[in-house]
Amino acid sequence: MARANPANKPQPNDAAETEKKEPIIEYYGEGAKDVKFNTDPNATRIRVYADGRILTDY
C-alpha cells in the first residue's frame, strides 16, 4: 500500500535536508580567486573561471 502523505509535501524527517547551505564555490584557472562576484543565496554550486565567467547551478 502506498504512503498516505503526498510526495511533494516535505515530511518532518526531511526538514534537516531543507536547511540553507552555502553554495560550493569552485575556482578554475590562475587568478580565478581574484574575480569579484556576488554569491546567489539560491545557488547550489558556483564555478568561477579566470577569464571572468561565472556559472551558477541551482
Image: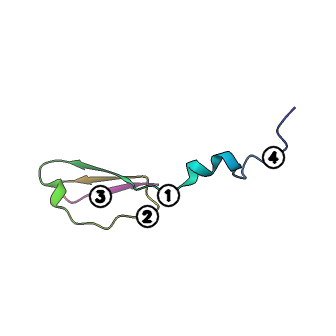
Q: Earlier in the sequence, mark 2 or mark 3?
A: 2
Outermost residue to the left: 30
Against 53, residue 11 (above or below) is: above
Tell me the crowding category of disc 2: few under 14, some 14 to 19, or many 20 or more residues within 10 angstroms, Cα based: few
Rendered location of residue 41, percent (x, y): 43, 64
For disc 4, the marked residue is 5
Q: Earlier in the sequence, mark 3 or mark 1?
A: 1
Q: Earlier in the sequence, mark 2 or mark 1?
A: 1
Question: Which residue occupies 22% across, 66% down?
Answer: 36
Question: Which numbered marker is on residue 20?
Answer: 1
State which region is magenta. Answer: 52-58
Question: Which residue occupies 49% across, 58% down?
Answer: 20
For disc 3, the marked residue is 54
Distance between mark 2 and mark 3 Cα atoms? 15 Å
Tell me the crowding category of disc 3: few under 14, some 14 to 19, or many 20 or more residues within 10 angstroms, Cα based: some
Distance between mark 2 and mark 1 Cα atoms? 8 Å
Rendered location of residue 21, percent (x, y): 45, 55
Outermost residue to the right: 1
For disc 2, the marked residue is 41
Q: What's the residue type where badge 1 is placed?
A: Lys
C-beta proximity under 8 Å, tags 2 and 1: yes
Q: What's the residue type where badge 4 is placed?
A: Asn
Q: Earlier in the sequence, mark 4 or mark 3?
A: 4
Rendered location of residue 54, percent (x, y): 29, 58
Q: Earlier in the sequence, mark 2 or mark 4?
A: 4
Looking at the image, residue 8 sits to the left or right of residue 29; the answer is right
Q: What's the residue type where badge 3 is placed?
A: Ile
The residue lying toward the viewer, choosing from 16 and 57, is: 16
Mark 2 or 1: the one toward you: 1
Q: Earlier in the sequence, mark 4 or mark 1?
A: 4
C-beta proximity under 8 Å, tags 2 and 4: no
Looking at the image, residue 23 sits to the left or right of residue 4; the answer is left
